[in-house]
Amino acid sequence: MWMQAVVVSATLLMAARDKGPAPVVCAATSHGRAFERISIFNVDPAGKEYELAPDSERKTGGLVEQAWNLANYREMALVLRCRYRGTEDAVSMELPARVKTCTFRYLAGNDGRVVAGSEMACK
């Protein structure tokens, strides 16, 4: 099952908000490594993972915003994986049913890879 994957012991934070439930966000660092990007997976009962592509992507210059509409993928468990620079280790958590969307914004290099400014939230 997905929970058996090697996971860095970093904390996923629930950011405080005035209205509604707090969004799910990745910790800014894990073991001294800066947050880089997210991956979102469907996981079947046998533990097989299916990575989900963003439902939309907007580019403005080098800024990229990706969005996942999670209501379309609730037949199986949904897992958020936070990835950090310079390591294959990641922090994973199952996304609760109240979470409807995830967004990820970053500055892309010429090759399309994340170079700076990574931020995300799942609400």
Image (cartoon, rainbow, N blue to C red):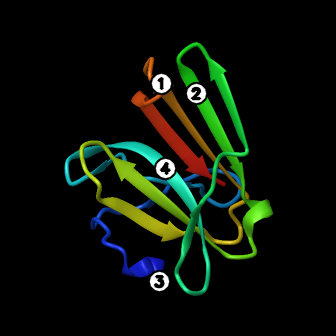
Mark 4: few, some, or many residues within 10 Å (few <14, many ≥20)? Answer: many
Dot 3: element: loop
Mark 1: few, some, or many residues within 10 Å (few <14, many ≥20)? Answer: some
Q: Which residue is mark 2?
A: 64
Mark 1 or mark 2: which comes first in sequence?
2
Q: Which residue is mark 3?
A: 1
Left or right of residue 45: residue 30 = left
Q: Which residue is mark 1?
A: 107
Mark in front: 3 vs 2: 3
Find residue 57 and report its horizontal and vertical position in percent: 68, 33
Mark 2 or mark 4: which comes first in sequence?
4
At x 62% / y 79%, what residue is drawn?
44
Find residue 79 and report its horizontal and vertical position in percent: 55, 67
Residue 77 to residue 34: above or below: below
Q: Give the residue type that dot 3 points to.
A: Met
Which mark, by number, is residue 38?
A: 4
Q: Are marks 1 and 2 in contact (CB under 8 Å)?
A: yes
Q: Can residue 27 be seen at all in this image of the molecule?
A: no
Which quadrant of the figure has residue 13?
A: bottom left
Find the distance from the CA under tag 3 to the CA under tag 2: 32 Å
Dot 2: element: strand
- The quarter of the image holding the C terminus is bottom right
